[in-house]
Amino acid sequence: MMHEYWLQRGATLLVALIMLVVMTLFALTTFRLGKSSLQIVGNMQQHDQALNSADNAVEEAISSTRFFQNPALVFLPTCGGANVKCYDINGDGKPDVTVALTPSPYCVSAATIPNSSLDLSKPEDLGCATGVTQSFGIVGSASGNSLCANSIWEVNAVATDPVTQASAAVTQGVAVRVSTDAVAAVCP
């Protein structure tokens, strides 16, 4: 009888130890899953911050006339060279995300606007109009083109967080009416 008593106590102890090991494994698995989920959310947040920074850089670039006047120097060198912009995401005064316009914005195409297509009642068209002299039959005389061209540009921004290595790329096209002199050097 005593032998059965010790056998029952041993079996109970063994079952309790097995349950303790199972509960410990369950707790560790739950901790690791929680940690993985937290890392995934953190990575998504860092990627979103990089993407927002790239979007901001593109918007800032196309809001300036520098992107079609001097595509190699859209952003003045302040934090890492020409066409590089730094953003402080957390407000600590240190750059968190670096965005590079790479390659430099480039003109995809430009088409000179004919004078006949202008509406001289619109201020933006009035500045494009040119007078045409009567010089029929003379080579190189008036072509009927205005002083403006519709140009299409592509702007690429690559944002990188140097600490976490999170990165995002944004490509945006933009149509801009510019003077024919401004696009002559940079558009095909």
Image (cartoon, rainbow, N blue to C red):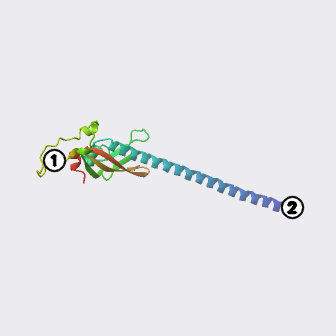
In this view, 4 is above or below 183:
below
Q: Nearer the viewer, residue 27 or 46?
A: 46
User: According to the image, label 2 marks what residue?
Assistant: 2
Label 2 crowd bin: few (<14), some (14–19), many (20+), radius 10 Å: few
Secondary element at tag 2: helix
Q: Give the mark nearest the N terminus, 2 or 1.
A: 2
Which percent across, then down, holds residue 3? 85, 63
* Other-residue count near label 1 (Cα within 10 Å), few / some / many at <14 / 14–19 / ≥20: some
Instruction: State the image coordinates of residue 22 (x, y, percent, origin top left).
Output: 69, 57
Front residue of 62/131: it is: 131
Which quadrant would the N terminus be assigned to in this image? bottom right
Q: Amino acid at mark 2?
A: Met
Q: Using the numbered discs, state the Cα–Cα distance from disc 2 to disc 1 in whole angstroms.
A: 120 Å
Q: Position of residue 171 (x, y in %)?
A: 37, 51
Q: Which residue is mark 1?
A: 142
Q: Which mark is residue 158?
A: none
Q: Residue at x 40, y 41 (%)?
A: 88
Q: Residue at x 13, y 44 (%)?
A: 134
Which-is-in-front pick, marks 2 and 1?
1
Quadrant for the C terminus in the image: bottom left
Which kind of residue does numbered mark 1 sit on? Ala
Looking at the picture, how far across and down is residue 141, in whole percent?
Answer: 13, 48
